[in-house]
Amino acid sequence: MLQQELDILVRAVVIVQRDVDASEVPAQIHLELVGKDGCRDAYHVALASGEFWAGTTGLSGEDESVSIYEVADGVQDLLAEVLRVPWPLCPWHQNVLRLGMLRADVEGQRPGREFPYWLCPASGGHVVSAVGSLHP
């Protein structure tokens, strides 16, 4: 894995950690090198203790939006499976949010690019926030 790709994954973890913190879930997330995925280093999201990690293939780090999506998806699985915490929840409906990629302008991203958002399936579906922007 190139250093640039690892840097993208580290930034993605910081962005998703903001949502974990906003939800008041007592978990610190980090990247864990768990081996090789083919000839590439395989990094996965893990609890800070390193005891548990999520994902069946390594995170790519090739694209910032895709990396944020992959990290958020891994953290959602990790929290559900290990801590038994349904995360994140819609602040209006208390449903578990789903990830989706939407074309929209997000601060710090190129205009018109797809970016990962948290979506609620209730009431016909609605956007809750961009990943990294959940409010407590």
Image (cartoon, grey):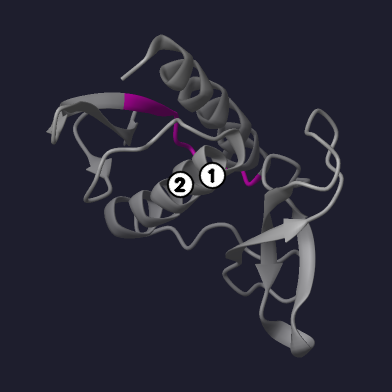
Amino acid at dot 1 = Val
Give the residue at x 51% y 30%. 13
Magenta run includes residue 132: no
Percent x, y of residue 69: 54, 48
Question: Which residue occupies the extreme bottom position in the image?
Answer: 124
Cβ atoms under marks 2 and 1 closer than 8 Å: yes
Residue at image coords 68%, 39%? 132
Quarter of the C terminus within the rendering? top right
**76 to the left or right of 134:** left
Q: Give the class, few, some or many, for how many residues have Cα within 10 Å of label 2's Cα (few <14, many ≥20).
A: many
Q: Quadrant of residue 6?
A: top left
Query: Residue at label 2?
Result: 70
Mark 2 or 1: the one toward you: 1
Where is residue 1? Give x, y as percent: 31, 20
Residue bounds of the magenta highlight: 23-31
Which residue is tagged 1?
A: 66
For the point 78% across and 46% down, the residue is 135
- Along the horizontal axis of the image, is 87 left or right of 136? left
Residue type marked 2? Glu
